[in-house]
Image (cartoon, rainbow, N blue to C red):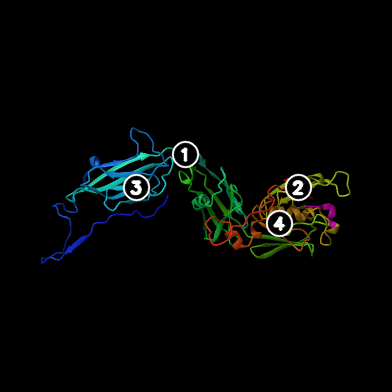
Amino acid sequence: MNDTPRIRTVLSCTLLALTVTAGVTACAGGGDHPLSARPYDAADEIAFNAPGDGKKADPEKPLEITVKDDDGRITDVTATDASGHHLAGELTADGQKWRSTAALAAGARYTVQVATEDEDGAPGARTFTFETAPAKRALTVAFGPEAGTYGVGQPITAELSLPVKDKAARAVVERALKVRSTPAVEGAWYWVDDKKLHFRPKEYWPTGATVSVSGNLDGLKVGDKLYGGASKPLKLTIGDRIEAVADAGSHYMTVRRNGEVINTIPVTTGKPGFSTRNGIKVVLGKEYYVRMRGTSIGIAEGSSDSYDLPVYYATRVTWSGEYVHAAPWSVGSQGVANVSHGCVGMSTGNAAWFYENVRPGDIVRVVNSEGEMMDTFGNGFGDWNLPWQKWRAGSALVTDAANPTATEDAKARLRPSL
């Protein structure tokens, strides 16, 4: 909820300098009622527009509190929901009316404390509670990946249940999505489309970090008659920094753990016409056995490039079927030439070692290939290929930069290439 300070009418007090042994303060305004006087029950003097008889208030309508008797006045109003969020409001200069200026939450219970004074300055008080009706349309968010330990390149995903197109509404949603890292990092959300956001730090996650993700949308007004719903929080831990760089020019892959080289492996990458994508990719998962067919990437059955092979120790880096995997049939070309259909191939022993030493979220970077750059979105996690300033411009909270549109093909094939 909006925690904007309430606008109050404040009574001025005059400090009286008396020729006695102690200083005394008193408020101007007349009457014989000291500030310490217990407030009287102001229930008969105050009216509000929340319905009674167990009925629930319409969250689309503001809360209004008024004074029945022109001789009295409201001096303060505090309205909070069950989570302790304050409802911002404004009091008229004459103290006759208080009106909420922030949207009420849907499906919430509010406690309202009203302070008053009568014509003689005597303090009064009233406390009441009311509930708002639940939202007819609830926007929920599902965070990804699943809880667990991941590599330093793992983005956080947020999948919305309904599309959000308006930038102001997107800003409301984004402010409610909280990512906390220990140690702390600089990071930002990027709107991939109307229903999906990705979060990544400016640099890779720190090794050993813990990452907590939560959504504070429940009951929050997002847009016209659209309110947020509850979401399940997420907690991740970050493992060692594993980075594999496959050089299509030298035909070798160098693997580092926390900056130290732990293996150099001869490989083969995509041949002309099937060149491996350049750029940073993130390990999506591992599959001990995959059956790979040329027909899955558009190769006609019976052509010279056709294949149908069992593949082992397959580490996936794109949804369209790019893997790092065992390729015992091309051992003679590994370290020498590029002969694959787009994957990074190596001996069975090296593929087994790689398979055992990486996890989802680890980095695989391909350099010096004749292939195109890895898509930023839609075919895995190419998030790290977008420069930081362009990434930040994808946030609804950034107003000083153009918001780029993700143009990558989000309909990438989900079957493996070889």
Mark 3 or mark 1: which comes first in sequence?
3
Query: Mark 1 falls on what kind of element?
Result: loop
SS at mark 4 in the image = loop
Residue bearing mark 1: 135
Q: Which residue is mark 3?
A: 99
Q: Position of residue 32 (x, y in %)?
A: 13, 52
Is the C-beta separation of discs 4 and 3 under 8 Å? Answer: no
By secondary structure, the bulk of the magenta-drawn segment is best described as: helix
Work out whether mark 4 precedes mark 3 in sequence or the reverse, and give the earlier one.
3
Callout in the foreground (1, 2): 1
In the structure shown, which secondary structural element does the residue marked by tag 3 occupy? strand
Query: On the image, which quarter does residue 153 sit in?
Result: bottom right
Give me the residue at 25% from left, 46% from top: 125
CA–CA distance in space, label 4 to label 3: 53 Å
Cα distance in 3D space between marks 1 and 2: 43 Å
Asked whether the beta carbons under mark 2 and mark 4 sit within 8 Å of each other, the answer is no
Q: Which residues are magenta?
A: 326-331
At label 3, which amino acid type do we have? Arg
Outermost residue to the left:
19
Nearer to us: label 3 or label 1: 3
Please tell me whether residue 330 belongs to the stretch shown in magenta. Answer: yes
Residue 141 drawn at (x, y percent):
54, 45
Amino acid under disc 1: Ala
Q: Residues within 10 Å of mark 4 (few under 14, many from 20)?
A: many
- Residue reaching furthest to the top: 53
